[in-house]
Image (cartoon, rainbow, N blue to C red):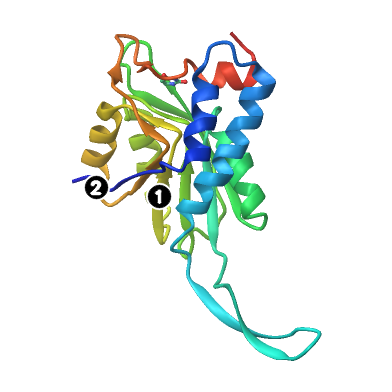
Amino acid sequence: MPEVHVIGHPLVQHKLTIMRKKSTSVAKFRTLLEEISMLMGYEVTRDMPLSVERIETPLMEMDAPVLEGKKVVVISILRAGDGILNGIMKLLPSARVGHIGLYRDPNTLEPVEYYFKVPGDMSDRDAIVVDPMLATGNSAAAAVAKIKATNPRSVKFCCLLCAPEGIAALHAAHPDVPIYTAAVDERLNDHGYILPGLGDAGDRMFGTK
Ligand code: URA
């Protein structure tokens, strides 16, 4: 069974509904994506290890919890992944950032990489791969394969919406990668769009339609 964490928090669900509406403006869509990504980031980072640091409050000393290591890299699948990246970076301002660009070859329909940049020291990092839409799962699976080749300590995948087909494809290729999402929609249409979905996440974020 794929490890899928559906973040059912009422704030996430309410914001997602506004994002789905075709009447929602580009500016509002962008703001909501950042807000929702912060809320999802809260769940994605729930198992981050803590250590203890001796600190001094104005009244006395204490052993206080701090994030251990903070070795996180957030990797955005271009271009819409940057919307989730912006929200998560508000929570983890010291996290390192990577980018991967893929396009779909119109003849083979296979993802082709055109950009890849991640930190040099990946082997002791926990990677959070972000892309709003897990549709066919082909790009996500190709991106995760490329990221795994850099030997990160762990990989998680965080998206806003999933199609069941995307979950199946990503899980088949990478059964060890947990998926965090705000909703699992019904299905894909013939053009690979998620139904009911929210349309093209990149176009809605950047106003490029
Ligand atoms: N990418 C999008 O932006 N929207 C979809 O519905 C599917 C893939």
Q: Secondary structure at mark 2?
A: loop
Which residue is the site of mark 2? 175
Label drawn at residue 19: none
Residue at the (55%, 56%) spot, across then down: 120
Residue at image position (63%, 48%) is 89
Quadrant for ligand 1 reads: top left
Closest to the observer: 84 or 14? 14
Q: Is residue 6 above or below residue 204?
A: below
| Farthest-out residue, left | 1
Residue 155, above or below 105: below
- As measured in the structure, the alpha-carbon distance from the residue carrying label 1 to the one carrying label 2 is 11 Å
Disc 1 crowd, CA 10 A, few/some/many (<14, 14-19, 20+): some
For the residues labelled 1 and 2, say whether their Cβ atoms are less than 8 Å apart: no
Q: Nearer the viewer, residue 83 or 110?
A: 83
Q: On the image, numbered disc 1 is attached to which residue?
A: 156
Q: Pick whichever of labels 1 and 2 is earlier in the sequence.
A: 1
**Farthest residue, direction front:** 10
Q: Which quarter of the figure is the C terminus placed in? A: top right
Farthest residue, direction bottom: 60
Query: Visible in this render: residue 23?
Result: yes
Label 1: element kind: strand
- x and y, in percent, of residue 165 in the image: 25, 27
Answer few, some or many: residues within 10 Å of disc 2's Cα (few below 14, many 20 plus, some between 14 and 19): few
Amino acid type of the residue tagged 2 in the rendering: Pro
Q: Position of residue 88 (x, y in %)?
A: 59, 46
